[in-house]
Amino acid sequence: MPYNRLGSSGLQVSQFSFGSWVTFGNSVDTGIAKEQLQAAAEAGVNFFDNAEGYARGKSEEIMSEAIRELGWKRHEYVISTKFFWGINGDVPNMKNTLNRKYLMQAIDGSLERFGLDFVDLVFCHRPDPNTPIEETVYAMSDIVESGKALYWGTSEWSAGEIRAAWEIADKRNLRKPVMEQPQYNLLNRTRVENEYARLYEDIGLGLTTFSPLAGGILTGKYADGVPEGSRATLRGHDGLVKVAEDSVNQVKRLAAIAEDLDVSTAQLALAWTASNPHVSTVILGASSPGQLNENLGALNALERLTPELKATVDEIFEN
């Protein structure tokens, strides 16, 4: 497993990481989570992604229980959480915000659920147009300064918002945002490849990308319709069906290249995402240890993805 620096920081994260979005607390309990985390660690994964909003805090509890049962030492893994939506119901200052009151209480809540003294990474899960960025930057900087998190960053922020936060921190001598967590895959490329282009060199932005298979579309499983139990059948994922229908021919061409390489379509799509030099880590999701091990086979696909083949894939999925 290769390890990459998280942007300009000194922290090293595995090329592929493991996240609990959609699964932990929904289709995955502590027993399965334990098997998944063990499989990931055995493959060299050291970064495990989570969020307060995943299953309303239950995901953090399940990951914590699994790590505790596995007996991992704190120095052996990197763990994250994210804040924005809140889990305390429709209460003023506790929902859809990045104000100081919420953030300072949210970090304490996550640490309690994790049973940890600190998380390695903390993200602002979405931008908050109703809170001054300066207020959010001060709060996040204070969280890092207090030792409750080691690095902070953003998720799905625009380039302008990220730069504004970084410049405020720079002028005020505060802790700067280090990383961004955007969606990035063959069907969603513009933000990472174009919008953020100046940020990698200008501020040393690192990426922990999610949804590398576009909700399963890039596995090819939607080629003949929507399989029962697939993500497209879950609440809030209705749009996957339309995207899957529109990209059927592209995915079939990707599958043909994968077959020639003797890898799965999913493994090739994952390898393509990981081949971007600005991507520090690609977050994998899985509902079973077997599915996770299959996806981790993308390491072999990455070794076989020559510049010529990558260019061919790029052409198929041109923006």
Image: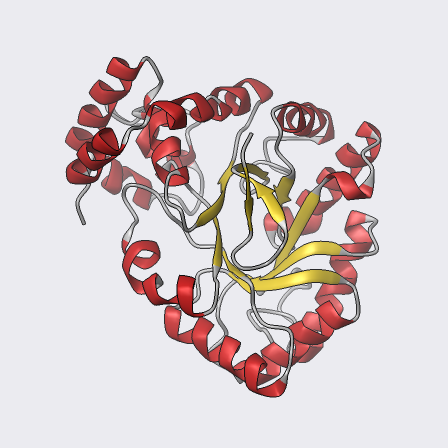
Residue depicted at x 20% and y 36%: 311
* x then y, percent, for residue 303: 39, 25
From what the image shows, is residue 225 above or below residue 50? above
Residue depicted at x 32% and y 33%: 217
- State how the image is colored: secondary structure
Left or right relative to 290: residue 100: right
Residue depicted at x 18% and y 25%: 253
From what the image shows, is residue 167 above or below residue 83? below
* x then y, percent, for residue 118: 78, 56
From what the image shows, is residue 169 above or below residue 217? below
Of residues 81 and 166, which is closer to you in this image? 166
Left or right relative to 304: residue 243: left
How many numbered marks appear? 0
Residue depicted at x 40% and y 50%: 183
* x then y, percent, for residue 99: 62, 78
Left or right relative to 93: residue 104: right
- Residue 131 appears in the rendering: no
Quadrant of residue 264 within the rendered picture: top left
Of residues 36 and 318, which is closer to you in this image? 318
Of residues 193 and 219, which is closer to you in this image? 193
- Residue 81 appears in the rendering: yes
* x then y, percent, for residue 237: 39, 44
Quadrant of residue 45 within the rendered picture: top right
Image quadrant where one finds the N terminus: top right
Left or right relative to 190: residue 49: right
